[in-house]
């Protein structure tokens, strides 16, 4: 099958999932065409059946802001015709699904019927969906897609609540892990650099936006640090990073808080971590939590969004109400209370992550693709 993938090429959850899904499909023999404005961060080396097509913006003097959606639409039409795509799979409602709907209409005039699968990842629904300026476009893109998937049942519920969906059937296909990526050994030199006296390492990885509540990350860590020696490892960058570093210094914990910014492979710091903190306001799924669990790191997180679908409370970590940093700290201290207890939680976190194995998720997408392509072939010429 020849499939066009449209996604954000960044290190964010949706881009990572889309890229890894495309690579897994290619490994099964499908032909994948990534259509985006730069090469996906997790793409790796090109294979014979993986292609990247750049959506190149032009410096046309008429526009103050380049009309990316229109340029993307044209590129989708071009690639679909050139490579005779069987299907388009787009990640995010806007601008990707809305552009795909326009591309499909153009392609229909050229005799090509191209089904669209739209995967909703969260922000397009939970944030943009609440903005009246975007609601009509998002609703239209969802309802005009041939199939719609969400990464969690929580996100599916939010989508149905926020948008009419006109009876649209939405299928939940969760995010996933590729276990072979988590089999390496910890970098002991890095761990010794972060925690020279063998202190437990609590880690947080995010884009440091307000929704991630990094103040709660710091507050939880400080409560732990009051009881035991520990280090906080912050990975990533964003609007709240410098403020949280300054806050740690003001409170006298700057030497215990290590910020390493954005890195290409977040699995490396996870391998040296003992706990993962994710006290977000909301998470449509919580891919960072799943990656931590796959690395054998138990998670302390907010009981919100899709996180309860990923983390088993009291087994692979703990879930607490948003903002309850004291309870989160108590759970962290509980897990770190003895080496045996920490090791038990590590094994349980690893075992829970196996539920989201790519081999369990990939057939769900392939089944969806096959159904749509079969329906397309059944249509009269």
Image: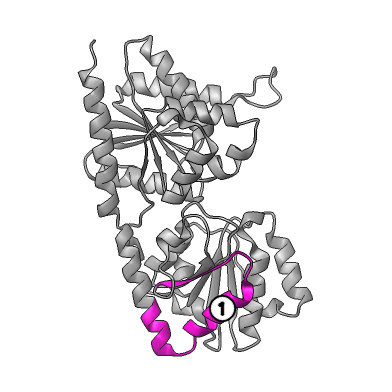
What residue sits 61% from the left and 82% below the top?
Answer: 224
Residue 184 appearing in the image: no
> Is 322 included in the stretch rendered in magenta?
yes
What residue sits 43% from the left and 24% below the top?
Answer: 144
- Please tell me which residue lies in front, 209 or 154: 154
Residue 153 appearing in the image: yes
What residue sits 46% from the left and 75% below the top?
Answer: 272
Which residue position is annotated with label 1? 194
Q: Position of residue 54 (x, y in %)?
A: 47, 31
Judge left or right: residue 190 versus residue 59.
Answer: left
Q: Is residue 103 above or below residue 130?
A: above
What residue sits 49% from the left and 40% below the top?
Answer: 159
Q: Is residue 231 above or below residue 114?
A: below
- Please tell me which residue lies in front, 266 or 327: 327
Quadrant for the N terminus in the image: top left
Q: Position of residue 205 (x, y in %)?
A: 55, 63
Q: Is residue 221 above or below residue 8?
A: below
Q: Position of residue 147 (x, y in %)?
A: 36, 32
The quadrant holding residue 145 is top left
Judge left or right: residue 233 versus residue 264.
Answer: right
Quadrant for the C terminus in the image: top left
Q: Is residue 2 above or below residue 186?
A: above
> Is 216 included in the stretch rendered in magenta?
no
The quadrant holding residue 83 is top left
Q: Which residues are magenta?
A: 316-345
């Amino acid at each position: 099958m020849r499939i066009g993938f449209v996604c954000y090429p960044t290190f964010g959850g949706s881009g990572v999932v889309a890229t890894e899904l495309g690579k897994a499909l290619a490994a099964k023999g499908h032909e994948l065409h990534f259509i985006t404005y730069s090469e996906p961060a997790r793409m790796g080396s090109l294979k014979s059946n993986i292609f990247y097509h750049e959506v190149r913006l032009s410096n046309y003097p008429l526009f103050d802001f380049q009309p990316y959606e229109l340029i993307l639409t044209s590129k989708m039409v071009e690639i679909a015709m050139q490579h005779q795509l069987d299907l388009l799979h787009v990640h995010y409602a806007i601008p990707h699904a809305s552009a795909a709907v326009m591309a499909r209409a153009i392609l229909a005039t050229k005799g090509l019927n191209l089904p669209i699968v739209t995967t909703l990842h969260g922000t397009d629904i939970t944030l943009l969906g609440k903005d009246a300026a975007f609601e009509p476009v998002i609703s239209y893109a969802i309802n005009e897609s041939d199939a719609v998937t969400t990464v969690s049942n929580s996100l599916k519920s939010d989508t149905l609540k926020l948008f009419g969906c006109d009876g649209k059937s939405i299928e939940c296909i969760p995010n996933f892990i590729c276990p072979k990526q988590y089999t390496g050994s910890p970098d002991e030199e890095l761990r010794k650099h972060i925690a020279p006296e063998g202190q437990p390492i609590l880690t947080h990885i995010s884009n440091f936006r307000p929704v991630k509540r990094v103040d709660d990350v710091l507050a939880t860590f400080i409560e732990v640090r009051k009881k035991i020696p520990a280090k906080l490892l912050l990975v990533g960058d964003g609007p709240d990073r410098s403020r949280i570093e300054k806050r740690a210094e003001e409170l006298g914990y700057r030497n215990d808080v290590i910020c390493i910014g954005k890195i290409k492979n977040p699995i490396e710091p996870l391998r040296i971590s003992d706990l993962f903190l994710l006290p977000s306001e909301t998470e449509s799924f919580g891919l960072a939590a799943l990656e931590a669990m796959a690395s054998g790191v138990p998670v302390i997180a907010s009981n919100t969004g899709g996180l309860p679908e990923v983390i088993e409370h009291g087994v692979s970590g703990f879930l607490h109400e948003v903002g309850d940093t004291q309870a989160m700290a108590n759970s962290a201290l509980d897990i770190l209370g003895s080496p045996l207890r920490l090791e038990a939680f590590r094994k349980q976190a690893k075992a829970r992550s196996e539920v989201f194995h790519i081999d369990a998720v990939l057939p769900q997408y392939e089944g969806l693709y096959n159904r749509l392509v079969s329906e397309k072939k059944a249509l009269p010429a």
